[in-house]
Image (cartoon, coloured by chain):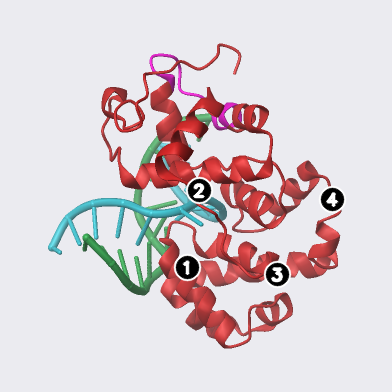
Chain colours: A red, B cyan, C green
Amino acid sequence: MFAAVFERLLAHYGLQQWWPADNQLEIMVGAVLVQRTVWRNAANAIARLKASGDLRTDRISALPSQRLEELIRPAGFFKVKAKRLQALCRLVAAAGGIAELERLPTQELRNTLLGVHGVGAETADAILGYAFKRPVFVVDAYARRLFGRLAYPCAVPTDDELKAGCERELKTVWRLNELHALVIAHGKASCGRVPACSRCSLASACGFARHALPASA
DNA sequence: CACCAGGGTGGTT
DNA sequence: AACCACCATGGT
């Protein structure tokens, strides 16, 4: 079922090609900056960090918080995010660098990331999928809404069910990463806040009928 | 003018 | 465990 949704979304919206970045740290920083924020604003903040030569773990860790706040201001929530970026960069330093984190198995790495202040499940999975190329699905509000509707009239899947189901069916990094991007593209392009699945564009614009989740998902 | 975007935390019930 | 307010800029 998840694979079928993926195929439909890919055919309808095309390849999304996330995540634009020069290196792994840029993706990790972007994952924090984009929290509850449009990508354009987060990208602006990243550009400012690059322009000042501060897009490095050692620089971000050592920067006076007020200076860092000013640099990332366009991303919004700048005081909160400045703390989160420093917590993340200090974890990388404590671990001995990104190359050392790379050695950890996915579950351990996920738990390590979740231990950082300001990194929750969604941000951790985005970092795992896009920066570390691990086969994980990023469950976000759009995914909950879309798959929750497609599950109707069955019970809406939990985050764990959604994540496990997608990972089991799609398996590869590029497909799971694409699915996340496609789900967001779809959420923005259509659907809105229509409560009933009958008007979800997977049923109309994408030529999709209502789907039930497998009982043991 | 109101509303929202590629969340997470801390406090309250 | 389930809410809730809060964080803040920039575009529609």
Number of callouts: 4
Residue A76 visible in the current orientation: no
Chain of residue at mark 2 = A
Q: Are marks 3 and 2 in contact (CB under 8 Å)?
A: no
What chain is tagged by disc 1?
A
**Does residue A111 appear to the left or right of A50 in the view shown?**
right
Q: Which residue is mark 4?
A: A104
Which chain does the numbered disc 4 sit on? A
Q: Relative to A174, is A29 above or below?
A: below
Residue at numbered disc 3: A89
Mark 2–mark 4 distance (CA, rounded to whole Å):
30 Å
Query: Residue at left 45%, top 17%?
Result: A155
The residue tagged 1 is A42
Under mark 4, the amino acid is Leu
Range covered by the magenta-colored residues:
A151-162
Do the residues under discs 1 and 4 have CB atoms within 8 angstroms? Answer: no
Kindly report which numbered mark, 3 or 1, lies closer to the viewer in this rendering: 1
Which mark identifies residue A15?
A: 2
Q: Earlier in the sequence, mark 3 or mark 4?
A: 3
Rounded to the nearest angstrom, the CA distance separating label 1 from label 4 is 28 Å
Q: Is residue A170 left or right of residue A107?
A: left
**Kind of residue sitting beneath label 3:** Cys
Q: Residue at 61% across / 13% down in the picture?
A: A216
Circle 1 SS class: helix
Q: In the drawing, does residue A200 fall left or right of residue A74? A: left
Amino acid type for the residue under numbered disc 2:
Leu
| Residue occupying the point 43% across, 18% down | A211
In terms of sequence position, does the residue under pointer 3 or pointer 1 come before the other? 1
